[in-house]
Image (cartoon, grey):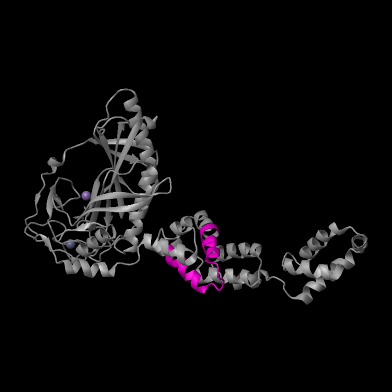
Amino acid sequence: MESRYNTIIGLEVHAQLATKTKTWCRCQVVSHAIENTKVCEICSGHPGTLPSMNQKVRDFAILLGLATQCRINLLSFFDRKNYFYPDLPKGYQITQYDVPICQDGHIEITSDNGEIKKIGIERIQIEEDTGKSIHNKKSTLIDLNRAGTPLLEIVGKPDIVNSKEAVSYLKKLHALLTYLGISSGNMQEGNMRCDVNISLSPKRSQKRGTRTETKNLNSFRSVEHLIELEVQRQGQILDEGKKVIQQTLSFDVNSSTIKILRTKSDANDYRYFPEPDLSPLAFEQSLVDKLAAQLPELPDAKKSRFQGQYKLSSYDADFLTSSKFLADYFEKAVKFFRGKDAKKISNWIMVELFHALNEVALPIEKSPISPADLSELLNMIDSGEISGKMAKEIFQKMFDEHKKARTVIEELDLRQINSDDKIEELIDTVLEQNLNEVTRYENGEKRLFGFFVGQVMKLSKGQANPAKVNKLLHKKLD
Ligand code: ZN
Ligand code: MN
């Protein structure tokens, strides 16, 4: 059904910046504090107070602009966006309207066919957050701790055509924010919120269809789900020969339903005008150069380094560089690993570790197994001290009980038996107990060899080194 239409998707993302203090005052930025304890005259909008800008906000905006190939405007301006809402104490939001600090950049994503696709960024603007309305059964309470905390609004160009591309774009943006260290990127706490604009138009039509805007999604999954449902909904409307109405929507994640918030108001309704209490934001190119020199290795560069240096596939390198913490985890593990093939580490992280983390819904940041401890386990496999099968059992115990591999091995008495003497002892016992089979083997029933191997492994409770059992059995029998 959708295939009769072209889908156009544009994303607007609000990212909360990880500054110590708010945008225009010295109040602390904290995610959990008693309500209305991180407020002052300025951020609570008392008459006669003047804002003065936190320079970290400017620097963080420039860093993101550089990381997304934007043009950095050495002169930009602040404007007032006027609207009346209880959690907006001044009655307006300070934002950037005509000239924002960064413009015309892009983010690269890998699209469905494996090709690199550029998603344009129209602008990045500095603005302030509102307070929070807390709705009780009978009343609404206001918490102004968040009022005046700094945000960047990243306005993407409508270059996205499906939910997969949207999620890739958001994940890349999220990675950039966290690699740069300018936002915690904690989506559950609303540190990165996304508005989704969607329109459909018939395939041969030149005219772009009417769009809807869905506000404030705060997970990759909800963005993906919303896009699929909204594309379907608009497709149905057009199929019936009706018109899509320009509306602002909200998405209820629990019931997977789209609700209409309001029929779209034009930008004019906000009566934007220049902010008279702040001077224009002006700085020299030398500041941009200084910040450019401070840029860390970013996800794309790290990915290609991982592919070259560690011989990882594109898929593995993509996965491991999706967050800075994960990339660092991998490289720390590599340092402690005495083997040569780093692919072994990436396998254990991507398969065993992530499987275990997902089972208990833990992020990698909270992994009970440290990179050093993971490598120690892999070193033991490489040296033959334990088998790969034992390692999986040991790994699960390390994960569940927060123990090191050595401790688990000692507790379970799991060490692999490698000593020739010990294995020969086991073989002798097995042969003595199975004299019939030995005679049959000597008379030519060579397929019984596997039976003897099985018996030795069983007697050793699976701990004998199977390669050595094979070798020494051959020596004894043949
Ligand atoms: Zn304040
Ligand atoms: Mn905004």
Q: Where does the C terminus fall, quadrant-wise?
A: bottom right
Tell me if 412 is positioned left or right of 32 in this view.
Answer: right
Q: Quadrant of residue 448?
A: bottom right
Q: Where does the N terminus fall, quadrant-wise?
A: top left
Q: Looking at the picture, how far across and down is residue 97, in whole percent?
A: 14, 50
Most common SS among magenta residues:
helix
Q: Residue at x 37, y 33 (%)?
A: 232
- Residue 186 visible? The answer is no
Tell me if 147 is positioned left or right of 111 in this view.
Answer: left
**Residues shaded magenta:** 326-351
Q: Looking at the picture, how far across and down is residue 469, in whole percent?
A: 77, 68
- Residue 416 visible? The answer is yes
Q: Quadrant of residue 5?
A: top left
Q: Quadrant of residue 279?
A: bottom left
Q: Is residue 8 above or below residue 357?
A: above
**Is 42 part of what is drawn in magenta?**
no
Q: 114 or 93: which is nearer to us?
A: 114
Q: Looking at the picture, how far across and down is residue 237, in whole percent?
A: 32, 27
Q: How many marks?
A: 0
**Is 349 part of what is drawn in magenta?**
yes
